[in-house]
Image (tube, rainbow, N blue to C red):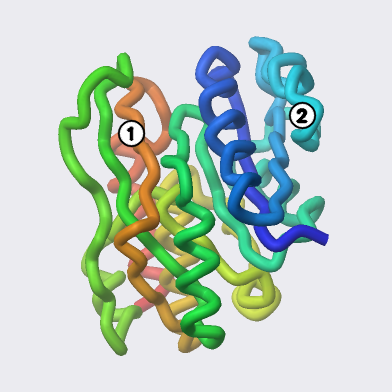
Amino acid sequence: MADFSIIIPCYKQAHLLPKAIESALAQACDVDLEVIVVDDGSPDGAAEVAARYSEAIVIRQANAGLCAARNRGILRSTGRYLLFLDSDDYLRPGMLAAAARAFAGNPGVAVVHGLADVVDEKDEQVVAEYGGRELGADAFHVLLRNNIGPPNTFVVRRDVLAKVGLFDVSLRSCEDWDLWLRIAAAGGQFQLARDMRSVYRMVPGSMSKNVETMWQAASGAVGQNR
């Protein structure tokens, strides 16, 4: 059983996958972890790329979508804390060490969240910063207004998912926002850890960068949680 599980779904991004996996495995110098890569029926050899890393656990499945891939990874994982890393993004060194300190300092917290450096498609320049907002005692109503960061800026306590459920496979986007709203609605505490940093890459065509799809999904997610 690991302390942390990093779950990396991949579909049509095998060329970006190595950096995501390497950034995840690098966290092992600070914490006990496992890295799970879910090849969601990717036609570009994602499983073969992931298999080059002997420390990673590789799962193959027929294409079922991002939520189903993450859920498959959750069910295979053993970690007490879970982080969801998209295959086109990556983590900064020491991110999980910062998460471990935050959870140790507040054993009752459900989710610890940090900040992401937004980089251009070529990963050459930081163009913005995403995240870093304090949610306070009423996280639910703050989150209702907008999502506060990409998935890789959040680490969630595993036992919380037993109460609120996994990712909603009916959602095409904003599935992470929906999960945070459900956790907050159940009374889960959110804590900001500014020394938790990751990287969010602006890749055209990526689901998380598809504005129209995100808007449609966000409208549904907010409506369901009112």
Secondary structure at badge 1 equals: helix
Residue sitting at x 52%, y 58%: 97
Q: Nearer the viewer, residue 144 or 77?
A: 77
Q: Earlier in the sequence, mark 2 or mark 1?
A: 2
Say if 115 sits above or below 22 in the image.
below
Give how far across and how far down residue 12 sits, in percent: 57, 18
Q: Nearer the viewer, residue 11 or 200?
A: 200
Left/right placement of residue 6 relative to residue 137 reads: right
Q: Nearer the viewer, mark 2 or mark 1?
A: 1
- Mark 2: which amino acid? Ala
Residue sitting at x 76%, y 58%: 2
Give how far across and how far down residue 73 sits, in percent: 72, 47
Q: Quadrant of the N terminus?
A: bottom right
Mark 1: few/some/many CA within 10 Å (<14, 14-19, 20+)? some
Q: What is the total number of numbered labels drawn onto the structure image?
A: 2
Report which residue position mark 2 lands on. Answer: 62
Q: CA distance from mark 2 to mark 1?
A: 23 Å
Q: Nearer the viewer, residue 168 or 191?
A: 191
Q: Give the quarter of the image for residue 184.
A: bottom left
- Mark 1: which amino acid? Lys
Give how far across and how far down residue 114 sits, in percent: 35, 59
Q: Give the quarter of the image for residue 167.
A: bottom right
Report which residue position mark 1 lands on. Answer: 209
Residue sitting at x 47%, y 49%: 94
Residue sitting at x 30%, y 27%: 202
Secondary structure at badge 2 equals: loop
Q: Quadrant of the C terminus?
A: bottom left
